[in-house]
Structures are given as structure tokens and as C-alpha cells.
Image (cartoon, rainbow, N blue to C red):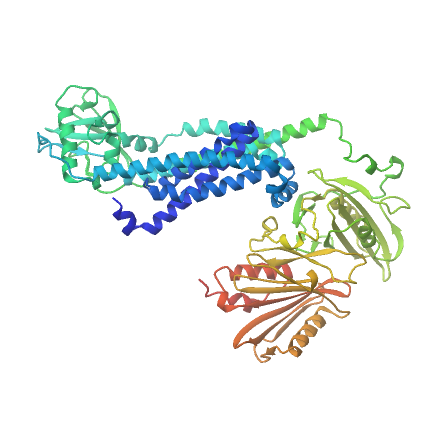
């Protein structure tokens, strides 16, 4: 019985079993979080058993066999998901409804700060999971012992079965795709159901998610009413057919137990092809004996006739006109010889119902969530406004009159930065450093600083000098207070000055309580609409939402991860220190770097380097009073003077963007006998300071993700170097 596993498809079945165990354990972890949200305490710990149960059962389902090997594979996902979900539950409890706070709590060492409760819950969860897994492991051992017993030859029956007896058993390998399809659909539906129970702890919106949960319940009723052959196919696992003396019989196998092997007949039907001939003969003799006696287990179908058939079933009727569907999962079976052809191969799986179930679930979920959001807005309108979290931050009413009105766009769009959601016109053309209002010819430059205080915000606001200074409060440069949807407070102000050469500059600054500072600048000629620029910028400041953690000396080197919400799958924002003299204060800056490798910092954190998927990237701030092209040329000459051997006859190309003041140079150099293609990039960070990056292809480490990584780095730098992209086109 082990021969097929060991010689035929061992690697594929092992992978399938591991994948199934991982998904099943994830469903159990989801169940634990739901139970912890609803009832908490010791009852929720019992869901540790659900993690192990679904891990083993899903592994068995995906692998197509039940054995100790499959159960053993499920142990690792069970333990990993148990540890993960225990940690997540404490993070959810630390900052319910605040995603940024939950993220910060999750990344913190909760196993120390959580105290004895953390370890008590982990111990209880692990004990329940291991207890359940041990039981299932023993069951798998019994299953293997049964297979060994069933594969042994037995004594032939005293009475041989009639030669004209034909039995038709359902073929398990034909039914398995239907079973797999249904169980995956059921698992996904349950996963979403459990997710909606505990998601309020992560995102808030408790009422909206409750309505979505009700929508899921309604979707269950709609899905259960869907017609289709899958239910009949799965029911066929317990039904067989026999023909004797030209008479057709329907037999309920579930009601027959083998007296020697002590199992129900459906279990023997699943392994029919592996049974020795003596066992098959004994099985057929038992069926012949059953047909010779009057009972309610075997039902005679008198004079069957074909009513109709399709790809998945026959529908026949007997002599009294009673109709019965027969799914096409019985090899070589023909219910009405002459009118129907014997089955030779498995019929295709019916996919319409899973697709309809997905559509129904999505519609019900969306409708419920939408109604819940409307109800939340209605109830919020009935409540009096909440006071600010700290009484001292409330500005005096006499001084709070704004001299500018915020201008809301017709279509609002959210732009995601690292730790910040900026809300403005959806039509703006966005990059990582600026927003362009092409219709009105306005450009809003954006920069972020981290780990700073109010002094930094004030200095940044007043950096542009000119005449006719205007702020949000008349004759005052004090900051106003705001609060995002997630309850994170921040201070903001807007300053406008008249520059020489008939230009106007607007500077907006907002500082969150977590030390993140955003600076938005817009400079335009006097013929542009000043109030439009100022009102648009004010709308951005009034509708900010700070979501990221506080960046500190202790954690700034550990923040790099893919910026999925900004549209990047391979690159994320890394943090480093600004060099001394760049600002009047200490500050952390950010820039995009590839994710997946180890980030190494140099010079006390002001420069860094990493490599991933065959691309090596270094970054640092360099001072230079010239243009970005001057920075690239200076870096090139410095590297050359340091001993780098360039091939100046190959791929020596320059590109310079005067408007954005960024530049790049594509070169080739020799590194210990290896040829390296590299691009030097300079981007103006502020006047007299440039962000310099060097991106080098390492052909010996290039993989199939190289091109995607480099394209994302091109986007973040505002350059396009097709030669560097093409270096990874042959990677596998």
C-alpha cells in the first residue's frame, strides 16, 4: 500500500499534503481569533484543537491519503500557526481598532511584555493542539494497519459468487476532485466568516462588519439552494449498483459492515483496486448473499428505462414511474444497456456552482458592509462631537478663524505613503515625491521626515523666506490640531510667502504625535490661481491620516518590507539618518530599497546597502551645490580614483532631467574578473543635498524576480534604463 507513495508521486503528494496542512491550520487559527473575540479565555483555547484537526484533515484531503506521514507533516504548520495566532491575539488586545498600533505591538517583544498571561495562553493553545494532533496521528496509524490487513489474502468463501454477478462501485479517484472542490469552497467561506468576527479588533468598524457578517449568513442560504450535480456525486460514495440475472439492484453500502475487517463497505470501495483477488471474491460473495435475501438494504430497480442524461448523470425510472438520478462515477456501468454507453473515463468537474457561490458571497458581503457603513455614519451624526484626546490641545475659539477655505476635490483619491494616507484629487498624477495637478499646472512636492519634534516642523515651515507672509491664523504661526480617522492626533499649519520674480510659495507641514513630519510645497507663478493651490493644500492637511509607527534609534533599521499599499511588491521604504549639517536637527529619512536581503548600514546609519534577486543597491545623502548631473559625475570620478576600473567604451550613457533635477549614468566596470553593469542615480533631496544611489546587476545571483525588482526601483527613482532591465530576461 505504500508503494505508490514511495515510488510514484512522493514529492508531489508531500507538497500537496504540506500545502493542505498549512491552509487547514490557518483556518483553525482564524477560528481561534473568532472564538477569542466572542468568548475569550479558556473556551477559546480549545480552538487549538481545531488548528490541529483542520491541519491534518486538509493535509489528508490534498494528499489523497491518510497516513502517519501526512499527520507528521501537519505538525509543523500546527505549531507555527499556534505561535503566530497567540502573538497576534495579544497585539490585537494591545491596540484594538488601530492598525498601526497593532502592527507596532505585533513587532514588539510581546513574549516578554505580555507577562505570564502570554505564556499561559500559548501553553493552553499548544496543549489543545498537540492533544488533538496526537489523537489524529493514532487514527492515521490505525488506518495504515487496516490497509495492511485489507491487502492480505484471505480464505475464499465457501460459496463462490455467481458468474453472472456484476458489481459497480464508485471510483474514488473520479469523486476526489469534486470533494476537493467542495471542501476548499467550504473552507474559504468559513475563513471569511471567522475573519469577519474578529476583524473589528484590527480595523474598527464594528457595526459595518456585523452587517457584513449578516450578509454572509444570507449568502449561506442562497448557496445552499444552488442546484448542481456535486451533491449527488458525493452521495454516490455510499451507494453501489449490482446486476444479477439481468436485474439491476441499488445497494446502500453504508449499512453493510465487513465482519472480518470490521469496516463499512464504503471504505472497502475506496481501496477496491488495491484489494487482493481473494478479498474481492469474498466481497462479491457477500453481495450475492445479500441479494438472495429479502431486506431493505438492496433495492431492486424493476425494468429501468432512461428518461434523459447529461455529462454528469443519468436519470432513470422504474416500472412504477419513479425517477432516480445516477451520477456518472461508476466505471463500466450502464444503467440501461443499449440506451446508455458504459462509462470509460471520468466526467469533467462542474465549476458553475463554485463560481456562483463566490459571486453570491461577494455580493452579500459587499451589500452588508455598505449598509453597515451607512448605519455607522447615521449613528455618528446623531452623537455629539467627541472632544480632543488631550484638553490642552484645543485652540482658543477666538484665534481659530481660518483665512483660507479648504477646497475639496470632486473625486477624492487616497495616496499611500510610508506611514501616511494623503487625501486629495483622484486625478492628480502621483509619484513617490510629488503630485501633479496637470489641469491647473500646479505641482505639490512631498517629503517625509521621521523621529522629529515641533521644532523641526517650525523650521521646515519657515525655511522659505519672502514677503507678505500668510498663515492659517491671522498674525500667528501657531499650529492647529487635527485627528485622523484612527484617532492619531497631529499638528499642522500652512504658510504662504511672496518670492522674487513674481512667484508664490506655499508650504504645508504636519507633525504627528508619533514624530512623523510631512512637508508639502507648491511654488507657482503669479498668474496661477493662488487660492486654488492654497485651498487644495489645506484640504490635504485637514484630511491626513498618520498610520505608521514611531521611528526611533532602536527600530529604524528593522522597518524595510514591501510597500504593498503603494503598489510595490518587491521594494519598500528603508530608513536612515540624515548626515550632520543637512538639517538643524536630528532626523530619519526614507528611501526605496529592494526587499528580501539583509540591509547593511554604514557610517553610523547615514548610508546603507542591500541586495536581492541579483540587484545590489546602495544609498546615501551627498552634499553638492551643483546639479544632479554634477553629483553623478563626482561620484563616478571618486569611484574611479578609488581604483574602480571602468570600461568607458561600453554602455557609457547619461540622462538628465532638468525639471526634476535628477540624473543617471549607465556604466560597466570590472570587479575581480567579473563584468558589472551599474547605474549611478542622483535625486535632489533639498537644495545642496542629493540622494545618491548605485544599482548594480550581479549576474550570478539573478533570478526570475530580477526584472520586476529593477522596474520598481526605476519607478521610485524616476528613471528608465532598459539595458539594466534586459539583464534579467534569461533568468529562470
Q: Which residue does the image show at 55% across and 64% down from the upper left?
A: 615
Can you give x and y, in whole percent of width and height, for residue 90 in the image? 60, 37
Residue nearer the viewer, 123 or 474: 123
On screen, residue 432 versus residue 198, left or right, reads right
Q: Is residue 725 above or below residue 241?
A: below
Residue 363 visible from this viewpoint: no
On screen, residue 540 versus residue 254, left or right, reads right
Can you give x and y, in whole percent of width and height, for residue 667 in the image? 59, 74
Q: Which residue does the image show at 21% across and 22% down from the upper left?
A: 297
Quarter occupied by residue 617? bottom right
Q: Is residue 73 above or below residue 307?
A: below
Residue 153 visible from this viewpoint: yes
Residue nearer the viewer, 608 or 243: 608
For the image, the number of numbered tags is 0
Q: In the displayed orientation, state which residue is furthest to the front.
A: 116
Q: Which residue does the image show at 84% across and 52% down from the upper left?
A: 496
Can you give x and y, in whole percent of width and height, for residue 225 in the image? 41, 27
Q: In the displayed orientation, state which residue is furthest to the bottom.
A: 649
On screen, residue 314 versus residue 221, left or right, reads left
Residue nearer the viewer, 494 or 192: 192
Where is the C terminus found, in terms of image quarters?
A: bottom left
Q: Which residue does the image show at 21% across and 37% down from the upper left?
A: 150
Quarter occupied by residue 695? bottom right
Residue nearer the viewer, 442 or 589: 589
Can you give x and y, in whole percent of width and height, for residue 174 in the image? 28, 40
Where is the N terminus found, in terms of image quarters?
A: top left
Q: Is residue 223 above or below residue 699?
A: above
Amino acid at each position: 500500500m505504500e508503494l505508490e507513495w514511495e515510488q510514484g508521486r512522493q514529492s508531489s503528494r508531500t507538497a500537496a499534503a504540506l500545502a493542505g496542512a498549512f491552509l487547514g491550520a490557518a483556518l483553525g487559527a482564524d477560528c481561534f481569533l473568532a472564538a477569542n473575540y466572542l468568548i475569550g479565555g479558556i473556551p477559546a483555547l480549545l480552538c487549538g484543537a481545531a488548528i490541529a484537526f483542520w491541519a491534518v484533515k486538509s493535509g489528508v484531503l490534498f494528499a489523497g491519503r491518510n497516513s502517519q506521514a501526512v499527520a507528521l507533516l501537519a505538525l509543523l504548520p500546527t505549531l507555527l500557526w499556534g505561535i503566530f495566532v497567540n502573538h497576534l491575539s495579544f497585539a490585537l488586545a494591545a491596540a484594538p481598532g488601530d492598525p498601526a498600533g497593532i502592527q507596532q505591538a505585533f513587532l514588539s517583544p510581546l513574549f516578554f511584555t505580555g507577562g505570564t498571561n502570554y505564556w499561559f495562553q500559548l501553553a493552553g493553545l499548544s496543549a489543545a493542539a498537540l492533544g488533538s494532533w496526537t489523537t489524529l496521528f493514532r487514527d492515521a496509524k490505525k488506518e495504515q494497519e487496516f490497509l495492511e490487513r485489507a491487502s492480505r489474502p484471505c480464505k475464499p468463501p465457501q460459496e463462490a459468487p455467481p458468474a453472472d454477478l456484476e458489481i459497480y462501485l464508485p471510483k474514488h479517484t473520479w469523486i476526489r476532485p469534486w470533494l476537493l472542490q467542495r471542501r476548499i469552497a467550504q473552507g474559504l467561506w468559513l475563513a471569511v466568516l471567522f475573519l469577519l468576527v474578529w476583524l473589528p479588533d484590527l480595523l474598527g468598524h464594528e457595526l459595518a462588519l456585523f452587517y457584513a457578517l449578516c450578509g454572509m449568513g444570507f449568502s449561506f442560504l442562497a448557496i445552499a439552494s444552488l442546484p448542481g450535480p456535486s451533491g449527488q456525486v458525493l452521495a454516490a460514495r455510499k451507494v453501489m449498483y449490482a446486476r444479477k440475472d439481468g436485474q439491476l439492484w441499488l445497494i446502500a453500502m453504508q449499512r453493510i459492515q465487513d465482519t472480518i475487517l470490521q469496516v463499512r463497505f464504503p471504505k472497502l470501495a475506496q481501496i477496491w483496486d488495491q484489494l487482493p483477488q481473494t478479498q474481492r471474491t469474498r466481497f462479491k460473495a457477500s453481495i450475492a448473499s445479500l441479494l438472495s435475501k429479502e431486506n431493505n438494504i438492496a433495492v431492486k430497480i424493476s425494468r429501468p428505462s432512461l428518461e434523459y442524461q447529461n455529462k454528469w448523470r443519468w436519470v432513470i425510472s422504474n416500472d412504477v414511474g419513479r425517477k432516480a438520478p445516477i451520477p456518472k462515477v461508476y466505471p463500466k456501468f450502464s444503467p440501461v444497456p443499449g440506451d446508455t454507453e458504459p462509462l470509460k473515463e471520468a466526467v469533467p468537474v462542474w465549476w458553475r456552482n463554485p463560481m456562483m457561490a463566490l459571486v453570491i458571497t461577494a455580493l452579500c458581503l459587499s451589500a452588508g458592509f455598505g449598509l453597515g457603513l451607512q448605519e455607522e455614519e447615521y449613528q455618528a451624526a446623531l452623537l455629539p462631537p467627541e472632544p480632543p484626546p488631550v484638553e490642552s490641545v484645543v485652540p482658543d475659539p477666538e484665534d481659530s478663524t481660518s483665512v483660507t477655505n479648504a477646497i475639496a476635490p470632486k473625486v477624492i483619491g487616497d495616496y499611500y505613503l510610508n506611514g501616511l494616507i494623503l487625501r486629495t484629487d483622484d486625478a492628480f498624477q502621483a509619484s513617490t515625491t510629488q503630485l501633479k495637478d496637470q489641469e491647473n499646472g500646479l505641482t505639490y512636492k512631498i517629503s517625509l521626515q521621521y523621529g522629529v519634534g515641533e521644532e523641526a516642523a517650525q523650521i521646515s515651515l519657515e525655511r522659505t523666506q519672502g514677503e507678505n507672509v500668510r498663515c492659517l491664523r491671522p498674525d500667528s504661526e501657531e499650529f492647529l490640531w487635527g485627528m485622523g480617522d484612527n484617532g492619531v492626533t497631529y499638528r499642522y499649519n500652512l504658510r504662504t510667502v511672496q518670492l522674487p520674480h513674481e512667484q508664490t510659495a506655499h508650504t504645508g507641514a504636519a507633525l504627528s504625535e508619533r514624530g512623523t513630519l510631512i512637508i508639502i510645497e507648491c511654488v507657482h507663478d503669479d498668474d496661477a490661481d493662488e487660492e486654488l493651490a492654497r485651498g487644495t493644500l489645506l484640504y490635504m492637511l485637514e484630511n491626513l491620516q498618520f498610520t505608521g509607527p514611531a521611528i526611533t534609534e532602536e527600530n529604524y533599521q528593522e522597518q524595510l518590507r514591501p510597500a504593498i499599499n503603494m503598489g510595490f511588491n518587491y521594494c519598500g521604504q528603508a530608513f536612515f539618518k540624515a548626515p550632520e549639517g543637512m538639517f538643524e536637527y536630528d532626523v530619519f529619512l526614507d528611501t526605496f530599497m529592494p526587499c528580501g536581503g539583509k540591509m547593511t548600514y554604514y557610517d553610523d546609519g547615514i548610508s546603507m546597502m542591500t541586495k536581492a534577486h541579483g540587484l545590489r543597491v546602495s544609498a546615501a545623502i551627498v552634499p553638492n551645490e551643483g546639479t544632479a548631473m554634477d553629483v553623478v559625475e563626482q561620484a563616478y570620478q571618486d569611484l574611479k580614483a578609488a581604483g574602480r576600473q571602468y570600461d568607458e567604451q561600453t554602455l557609457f550613457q547619461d540622462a538628465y532631467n532638468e525639471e526634476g533635477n535628477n540624473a543617471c549614468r549607465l556604466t560597466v566596470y570590472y570587479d575581480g574578473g567579473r563584468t558589472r553593469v551599474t547605474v549611478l542615480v542622483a535625486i535632489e533631496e533639498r537644495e545642496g543635498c542629493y540622494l545618491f544611489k548605485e544599482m548594480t546587476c550581479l549576474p550570478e545571483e539573478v533570478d526570475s524576480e530580477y526584472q520586476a525588482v529593477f522596474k520598481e526601483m526605476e519607478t521610485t527613482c524616476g528613471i528608465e534604463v532598459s539595458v539594466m532591465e534586459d539583464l534579467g530576461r534569461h533568468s529562470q
